Structures are given as C-alpha cells and as structure tokens.
C-alpha cells in the first residue's frame, strides 16, 4: 500500500510562461508551458505514476484497473483535475457550462473550478463576474465588445482564494500563478481572446459567443466564501470550500510545521500537492520525501499517515454527488 506519486502532464499555452520549470524543477523542455496537469485522469492528458508498483501507468488507467484504491467509486472517470497555471499573459475571458448543459451539448462534465493564488505581480487583478443585469444586456454588451463595462476586475495577491462555479465569467491575467482544483472537464467557452493569433497556425482561437451567453449566470452572484481555520498539532488547516456550497469537491490549504498525524477522515481518497517548502510523508515505517511541486494521491486503504516538516500543501477530496 503506497501513495500514488504523479508526474504532471504539461500543456503548452500561448499565454504560458517559464515559472513551472524554475519553481518546481520539473524536467520539461525549456520554453513556455502554461499548464501543468498535476493530478489528472482526463482522457489522453492524464498524469503518470512515477514510483512504486504502478510506475508508468496513467492515473486514468490506475483508476479504471484498481477501483479499490479509490473506494470503489460510482463515477466512471476520475472526477477531479488539479493544475498549476502560470499566466505570463492574459488568458481568454471564458465561462464553463454546468453538468446538465455539458453532458447534453459536449458529452463531457461541466466545470466548476477554484484558484488558490501562489504568486501575483504587484497590482495584479483578475476577471471574475460581470455587471449585466439581464441576459439581453449581457448579449448586447458582448456583441458590442463593451468589455470594460461588462467585466468585473478583482485585485489579487498571493494566498487569495477564488471559487469559480460553472456559469461564472472569469480570466486569469498576466503575472498570476495559481493552483487550480476543478471538475475533470475540458469544456471552455471563450467570450474574448484579445484578437490574439496562434504563432503556429496564424489563426485566432475560436470564440463561442452564443454558448457563453447561454451558460452565464445572470446576474452574477458572489459565492458566500467563509474560510474556517482549525489548528491541530503540527498543522493549521483552512477549509477553503466544502459542500453544500461546493457540490463537487472539498478543498483545504494546510500549513505544516512539525508533525501532523492524520487520516482519510471518512473521505474515499485525498489529492495532495506541495506548494511550498519540503518535508516527508510517513506511512507506517515507510518515509517518502516531499518538496514543492510533489503531487500524490492517498489511496483508500491507507489508514493513518503523518506529514513532517515545514510545508504548505493544498489538499482536496471528491464529494459523493459527483
Ligand atoms: Zn476556466
């Protein structure tokens, strides 16, 4: 019984930067990357197990072939997706559909996502929500390109947390780096891409104006985020979001200092990413080295384990409604 350590699947993006190589020391080609899918079971873009008896398999394969490691879940595919995003330029202004719309129109899951901000340049902001009061007003402002009036800009700094339910217009902007925890889905509707041209194809990326108008929540409502903080020996635990506000995942950010002995606490399995510092994971008499950029899953049968060291981690678990 071992934790499932994962190597990311890297996705180049036209807005990507080079921080993933320098911060996490990932062995990837020099150049702009943009997205590291650090815990992914998504289609052909799954992360790879990098040690132990399952080494070389994709998380997707492991999920299909060893359902017992995940508590024999009902969901046919691994339900969550965790990424590092390095925005070296503005991302397209976008919105994602909910499950009902995505299953009907795209044969994929909907996408509710969340961002825990790792770095932000001074005076950074991101786009979150909109000002339209009716769907007609939304459509009118989109068709006329009145982005300055339509889009809400929110200041952002390291340590901030944003919950982005399906239907929320959003965009990361230049100079922001986040760890994104979301439903496993790749359905994105672009409202605006700043007229950018792909260097390889010479074309602009497709916009999805009508679908964006259809799936956007109108008027925008800010989710009632209320981060609770608890202290256990060796750990300060922030509950960033949980059901019922978040129907798809639990999400925690934990500051470790010393030794924190814990367990699955009733969750079928846990997704863990080290975002700062280094230390160890101890399971019985086995010790595993952890450092910034390490990602793993604590499987269903692993009962008790300890984190040791001085680290920050982001941890998530699926909910049963997935
Ligand atoms: Zn998005």
Image (tube, rainbow, N blue to C red):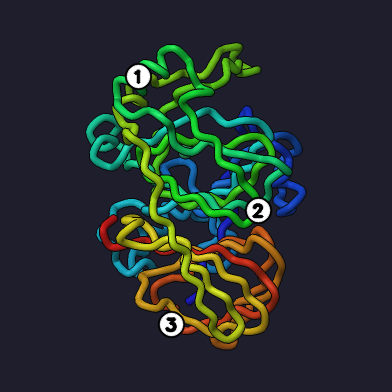
Residues packed near mark 2 inside 10 Å, few (<14), some (14 to 19) or many (20 plus): some
Image location of residue 100, percent across then percent down: 23, 40
- For marks 2 and 1 on the same chain, the one whose residue lies earlier in the sequence: 1
- Check if mark 3's residue and mark 2's residue have beta carbons within 8 Å: no
Q: Quadrant of residue 258?
A: bottom right
| Rendering coords of residue 257 (x, y %) | 67, 79
Residue 82, placed above or below residue 1:
above
Residue 40 in view in this figure: no
Report helix, strand or loop for mark 1. Answer: helix
The residue identified by callout 1 is 139
Q: Judge by depth and name the residue closer to the eye, 105 or 233.
A: 233
In this rendering, would 142 be left or right of 89? left
| Residue at 45% from the left image edge and 80% from the top image edge | 263
Q: Which residue is mark 3?
A: 303
Between the residue at mark 2 and the residue at mark 1, the CA separation in whole angstroms equals: 33 Å
N-term mark: 3 or 2? 2
Which x, y percent locates residue 22?
77, 49
Residue 177 as seen in the image, left or right of residue 127: right
The residue closer to the viewer here, 106 or 118, is 118
| Mark 3 vs ligand 1: CB below 8 Å | no
Q: Give the Cα distance between marks 3 and 2.
A: 33 Å
Reply above or below: 297 against 266.
Answer: above
Residue lying at 51% horizontally and 19% vertically, measured from the top left: 205
Left or right of residue 198, residue 54 in this image: left
Q: Secondary structure at mark 3?
A: loop
Question: What distance separates the C-alpha of mark 3 from that of mark 1?
Answer: 52 Å
Q: Which residue is mark 2?
A: 158
| Tag nearer the camera, 3 or 1 | 1
Q: Residue at x 61, y 39 (%)?
A: 125
């Amino acid at each position: 019984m071992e934790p499932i350590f994962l190597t990311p699947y890297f996705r180049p993006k036209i807005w990507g930067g080079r921080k993933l190589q320098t911060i996490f020391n990932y062995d990837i080609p020099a150049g702009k990357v943009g997205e590291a899918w650090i815990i992914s079971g998504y289609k052909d873009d799954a992360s790879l197990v990098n040690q132990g008896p399952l080494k070389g398999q994709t998380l997707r394969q492991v999920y299909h072939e060893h359902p017992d490691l995940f508590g024999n879940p009902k969901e046919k595919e691994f339900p969550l997706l965790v990424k590092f995003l390095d925005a070296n330029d503005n991302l397209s202004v976008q919105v994602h559909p909910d499950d009902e719309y995505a299953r009907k129109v795209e044969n994929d899951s909907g996408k509710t996502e969340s961002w825990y901000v790792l770095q932000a340049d001074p005076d950074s902001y991101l786009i979150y929500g909109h000002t339209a009061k009716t769907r007609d007003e939304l459509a009118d402002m989109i068709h006329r390109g009145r982005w300055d009036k339509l889009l809400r800009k929110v200041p952002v700094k390291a340590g901030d947390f944003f919950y982005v339910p399906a239907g929320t217009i959003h965009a990361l902007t230049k100079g922001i780096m986040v760890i994104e925890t979301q439903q496993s889905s790749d359905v994105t509707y672009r409202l605006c891409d700043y007229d950018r041209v792909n260097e390889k194809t010479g074309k602009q990326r497709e916009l999805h104006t009508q679908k964006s108008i259809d799936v956007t929540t109108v008027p925008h409502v800010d989710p009632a985020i209320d981060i609770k903080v608890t202290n256990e020996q060796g750990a300060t635990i922030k509950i960033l979001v949980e059901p019922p506000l978040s129907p798809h995942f639990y999400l925690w950010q934990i500051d470790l200092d010393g030794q924190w002995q814990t367990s699955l606490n009733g969750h079928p399995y846990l997704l863990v990413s080290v975002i700062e510092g280094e230390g160890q994971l101890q399971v019985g008499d086995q010790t595993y080295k952890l450092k910034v950029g390490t990602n793993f899953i604590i499987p269903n049968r692993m009962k008790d384990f300890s984190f040791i060291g001085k680290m920050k981690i982001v941890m998530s678990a699926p909910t049963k409604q997935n």
